[in-house]
Amino acid sequence: MTVNKDATALAADLATGVLSARDLTETAIAAIEAKDGAINAVVVHDFDRARRAAVEADKRLAAGERLPLLGVPVTIKESFDTAGLPTSWGLEAFRHAIAAEDAVVVGRLRAAGAIILGKTNVSEGLSGWNATNAVYGRTDHPLAPGHTPGGSSSGAAAAIAAGLSALDIGSDLGGSIRGPAHFCGIFGHNSTAGLLPLRGHVLAGRKARLDMSAPGPMANSARDLALGLSIMAGPDLDEATGYRLALPAARHDTVSDFRVLVLPEHPLVPTEPCVRQAVETFALALARRGASVQSALGIIPDPAQSTSIYMALLGGALGLGQTAEAAEQGRAKVAALLPEDQSISAMRLRASVISHADWLVANEARVKLRRAWRELFKPYDAVICPPTSVPALTHADAAATHIEVDGQTIDAGDTVAWASLATAAGLPATVMPVGKTPDGRPLGVQIIGPYLEDYTPIRLAELMSPAEAN
């Protein structure tokens, strides 16, 4: 027994009385209890409160109340505060840290009527794609056992792919939504920078790492991404005093009206042929349905420069709070680098000890990069590319510091180059499933859209999903 409809359909069934919130919640709980033992996706259970919330939701529905998710069971990535539940980020030191209140985005889902079943697993410290930590253990891939579902939104992607949850919240700094969505064959959306509040997503006493990090919905359909985004987006605290959100609708409602650029390869990192082919096949499908499709090479802002800007800014965020000894060791390693070494690994090392002055230079470059993308998105609507360089890896490869990609051995972290294209400029990016490898591992495509026009890449994903295409 699984949750076999998307959240939009479940909400409609609840509103019309086809389903009761109580029965739906019991179905979801039964699915977790029956299937999740081997997967280990939903690692914190809140079933008693979920059952009580379901009873209350049925009363509200019977009274005629209607909310976007009233009575729909969902899960929450462990790193987001959820009142009464632990928030550890998979770190042993925070195993027993109980949140006093909901993160803003969690509170907004709850206010929309969602019933929270529990919390989903993460990579330790929200770093890497190995889907394991000392607090909750390892999450397995529900469709390709023995493989990682990705990270850091590991359990969220696995739970949705396994039919244990209809909707979850991810967070994405280096592909933590996009990678797991691609690995698990689900939909995920990295939102425009600052669109969804991050309050309630920082561990007390630890570095914030807020710059460039973006929450976003993860689901089994593109329309659920739009629904989740509409609920969670909007200003918070000081900004909410004077700002109101009015996101534009998607630019087009027909595939043939879209003007799309295609980038199957990155100049700084190799990509597996099956991943490139999935992007190219998707581009052909767009063209067959009348979209204007052409190569992105020489048109989009330089991907290598985007990655360089991203790595500099990321280093400033990740280096916050490092010890003086670690910083000194980093500076010694940087001094040993050759000036002509512009590899991603070298970028990462230099960024780990970046000065404030150099960070400001990188930030200014980000402003110019965003302007360049703004000009690009006047004649074009979207850029499609891989979400990352590989399909789901075995657990051993996911834990390794180096991996082999298309015959080349690279630093595993270098694949973040694909995430950097959107994140460096704060752009929205939607990942949707588009196929499978010969051995059955899912393959996805990343659709990058214009700044604050999140509904445009989401809509293109919806139009190109099987339910719409048939």
Image (cartoon, rainbow, N blue to C red):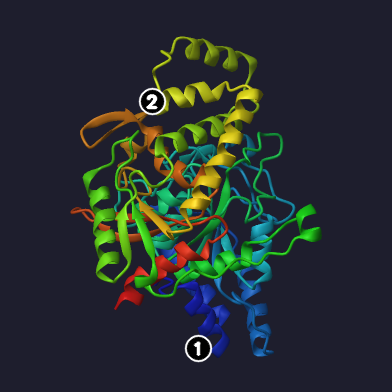
Q: Which residue is mark 1?
A: 18
Quarter of the image with the N terminus in it: bottom left
Q: Could you tell me which residue is drawn at 63 percent across and 61 percent down?
A: 233
Quarter of the image with the C terminus in it: bottom left
Give the answer, above or below, for where 401 lies relative to 68: above
Please rate how many residues cluster around mark 2, counting C-alpha atoms within 10 Å: few if below 14, some from 14 to 19, many from 20.
some
Q: Which one is in front, 86 or 33? A: 86
**Mark 1, mark 2: which one is toward the viewer?**
2
Q: Could you tell me which residue is drawn at 62 percent across and 38 percent down?
A: 209
Q: Which residue is mark 2?
A: 343
For numbered disc 1, what is the local secondary structure?
A: loop
Q: Could you tell me which residue is drawn at 68 percent across and 78 percent down?
A: 56
Q: Residue furthest left?
A: 438
Q: Which one is in front, 96 or 353? A: 353
Decide: marks 1, 2 in contact (CB < 8 A)? no
For numbered disc 2, what is the local secondary structure?
A: loop
Earlier-in-chain disc, 1 versus 2 = 1
Q: Which one is in front, 360 or 79? A: 360
Residue 132 showing in the rendered view:
yes
